[in-house]
Structures are given as structure tokens and as C-alpha cells.
Amino acid sequence: MSEQHASQFERGTDGPKVIVVGVDGSDSSFRAAAYATGLARRQNALLALVYVQPVLAGGAAFGVPVPETSGEIAEGLEAEIRQAAERVRGMWDVRWEFHTFRGDPYAGLVQAAGELRADAVVVGASEQAGHRLVGSVAVRLVKAGRWPVTVVP
């Protein structure tokens, strides 16, 4: 076995230990989070909920303070997730963490999955019609072929 191969992280040997799920406040992402929560519970895995803060250079031109707005969205998502976790505590004993990354959703999820050493990635299906032509984050993650990817409708 080569030295490089020996030092690589081995995925999927005993089931996932870290499951990354992308959340952005959409219904689809919340369904993905619910699915990933059940998977994490059954596998006794860490659930890493990831919000990718968009970097929109043009937003400031319209008077929108983009970093502050996306930070507020991240704080709101985390608060909503904490409230949901408190409601189901006892029924669903799941270890979870909330992370934020900056960039486009695909690059942010790739970075998150790499840094968190994810064994699996769960995302919601795109709700934007244009993604049928350009390709969604989910399709790009599947094509990357680095993790098992589950797309939740």
C-alpha cells in the first residue's frame, strides 16, 4: 500500500460516522435534514448541518449588506435547529453540530465534507427551475464521486 493511500481517510467501512447535510432554509433542505437526522440516529453518526453563506459581490451595489444578511440567516437557521432538537430530545438522541461556510453552495459543501471528514452527504432537491439546464448542487456532488450522496425530494 502506498504511503499516500495509507494516510487517506477510509470511508464507509462500518457505516457513516459523519453525515453532512446542507441546509438553506428551504423546505427541501429541511426535509433533507429530517432524513439525515434519522440516518444519523440509526447509524449513531455525527450529524453536521451546514449552511453555506453566499458571497454576492453585486448585492452591495443594491444597498444590501450581504455578509450581515447571510450571517443573520445562519443565526436564524441555527436557532430553528436548536429549537427542533430541544422538542425531540429524548425521542431522538442525535449528536449534531451546526457549521457555516462561505462561497457557492457546491464549493461550500465540498469544503465542509472534506474538513469534517464526511462519510455521506445529504441535500435537498433543487427547487429552482434553472437547475434543470445548468445542473444542481446535488448533481454536481454526485458527479464529484467523493461521497455517497442522497438527494431528498
Image (cartoon, helix red, strand yellow):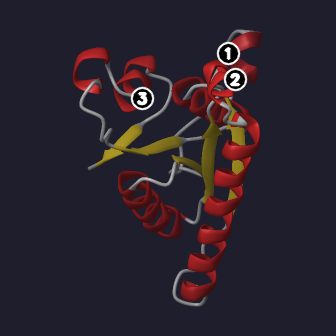
Q: Which SS class for mark 2?
A: loop
Q: Check the picture and name the quadrant holding the N terminus.
A: top right
The circle on residue 8 is 2
Q: Which SS class for mark 1?
A: helix
Name the residue rendered at 44%, 68% in the picture. Answer: 38
Query: Could you tell me residue 74's position as x and y percent?
Result: 67, 52
Quote the CA–CA distance across marks 2 and 3: 25 Å
Query: Could you tell me residue 109's position as x and y percent?
Result: 58, 33
Query: Could you tell me residue 126's position as x and y percent?
Result: 32, 38
Which residue is identified by label 1?
Answer: 5
Classify mark 1: residues with Cα within 10 Å, few (<14), some (14-19) or many (20+): few
Residues under numbered marks 3 and 1 in contact, where contact means CB atoms less than 8 Å apart: no
Q: Looking at numbered disc 2 in the image, what kind of residue is underneath it?
A: Gln
Q: Earlier in the sequence, mark 2 or mark 3?
A: 2
Name the residue rendered at 59%, 90% in the picture. Answer: 90
Name the residue rendered at 52%, 26% in the picture. Answer: 106
Q: Which SS class for mark 3?
A: helix
Name the residue rendered at 67%, 15% in the picture. Answer: 5
Which residue is identified by label 3?
Answer: 137
Residues under numbered marks 2 and 1 in contact, where contact means CB atoms less than 8 Å apart: yes
Query: Could you tell me residue 51's position as x and y percent?
Result: 61, 45
Closest to the observer: 98 or 20?
98
